[in-house]
Image (cartoon, rainbow, N blue to C red):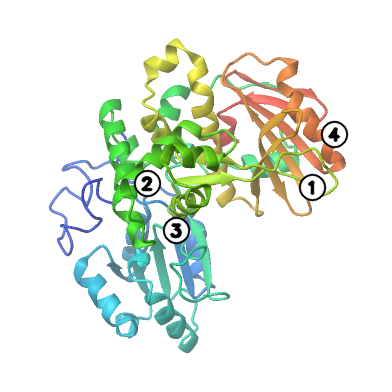
Amino acid sequence: MLQQMTEPSAGEREGEPLARKEPSAGEREGEPLARKEPLIPRHAEAEIRRALSDTRIVAVVGPRQSGKTTLARGIAQTDDRAFVTLDNEQDRRFALDDPLGFVRGHTALVIDEIQRAPGLILALKQAVDEDPRPGRFLITGSVDLFKGSISPDSLAGRVETMELLPFSQAELARARRSRFIDRAFANDFPAFTTTGATPNLIDRVLAGGFPEAVSRDAPDRRNAWLRAYARSLAQRDIAEIAVVGKHVEMSRLIDHAAVSAGTLLNMTNLGSRLNVDGKTVDRWLTLLEQMFLVRRVRAWHRSDLKRLVRTPKLHFLDSGLLAALRRKRAVDIGTDRGELGALLECFVHAELAKVAALADEPTAIYHYRDKDRIEVDFVLERIPGMIVGIEVKASATVRPEDFRGLRRLKDAVGDLFACGILLHDGERIQRTAQGLLAMPVKALWEA
């Protein structure tokens, strides 16, 4: 069993009711008694420490239960920094009542779940303007702090923001961070090599990456936790960033979004199922995006290409959560591999997002679809417009027609096309044409 490396489980606030309570012998907060396996290292830690060496404020954002508290607490202990979590009621009240007093006197402080006291942003700005030494504050947030209304003032030039999503497959394997995206833009893959099939692919897809979920061996217990997690976000946590009176409708939106995941987003259709208009659905989806539950993947387009569809796709950021919401089990997929397609696409999107967050260069993720309904699941783009296309196939058999979308994308972008990759459930990397390759899904984390 994998060791849990996360905040407390669903049904209790992080730090509540355990606030200010020291872990008992053989027990860490949020971990079962006597479980002593070493913590799973997070690849983001090295980048966070680099940022702390030259930036006044470092923000780590990501979904609840992704491991932010554990990582931040570990950095605080190693670096002898004070650590406070605003999931603790007493600390939260102090931060709300007197933000300046809360940060005054600290030369190095870790503040966990800062979105619960947004007034602290201004206090941090004042503190680092008065004392601009690097690495003074490490803050974490379970919402996208600087893309929504939670931040009352800009910290431009003072903060570096990093995403911490649930475990990547490379982290779960305790391997080095993946260089898949960097290698794809360099077209740095062998023309032919046998790697073996991706082990336990269905189990990986169904488990996802939330630490609490992957620590549970029983699929029914894992799925129960994931569904409770989604309900908690819709009914409780979302109230921290917006006034949404219709919590039942928010829960229903999550369920309907799960059914629509991986397809072109139709907000009018979603709204009709919920008896609200498309603008309301748009606003609610923005809130779910701010909480890292879903992400709208925009359509790739270029001004000189007129026949491209510009409708975004909707993806969840964890395939285990999507599978739990869809009530999909290993036995369902084992008897009908068609059930794997949308879940595998979600899984690949999540892995790409995790790899992109740590890649050498900023990488945008899009999808491609033209008016002939020819598609590419993911289009990666880097300045000055270099393109990598990625298609996902749930079977081990690769046919020439599976590359139709990648060939269309290659023709569209010309010399800016770095390569096109078909990820499949097979056993070998094989170059099929100039710039086009087929390779096992595991290349995402073993590259």
Q: Height in image: 104 above or below 115?
A: below
Q: Position of residue 147 (x, y in %)?
A: 52, 63
Mark 4 and mark 3 lie on one chain; the one further toward the N terminus is: 3
Pair 3/2: label in front: 2
Type of residue at label 2?
Met
In depth, the one of 247 and 179 nearer the eye is 247
In depth, the one of 73 and 325 nearer the eye is 325
In depth, the one of 339 and 433 nearer the eye is 339
Mark 3–mark 2 distance (CA, rounded to whole Å): 22 Å
Does residue 255 appear to the left or right of 303 in the view shown?
left
Does residue 268 appear to the left or right of 127 in the view shown?
right
Q: Check disc 3 and report the residue beneath it.
A: 61
Q: Secondary structure at mark 1?
A: loop
| Circle on res. 302 | 1
Pair 4/1: label in front: 1
Q: Height in image: 87 above or below 98?
A: above
Q: Check disc 4 and report the residue beneath it.
A: 411
| Circle on res. 250 | 2
| Residue ID at (26%, 80%) | 97
| Circle on res. 419 | none
Q: Secondary structure at mark 2?
A: helix
Type of residue at label 1?
Arg
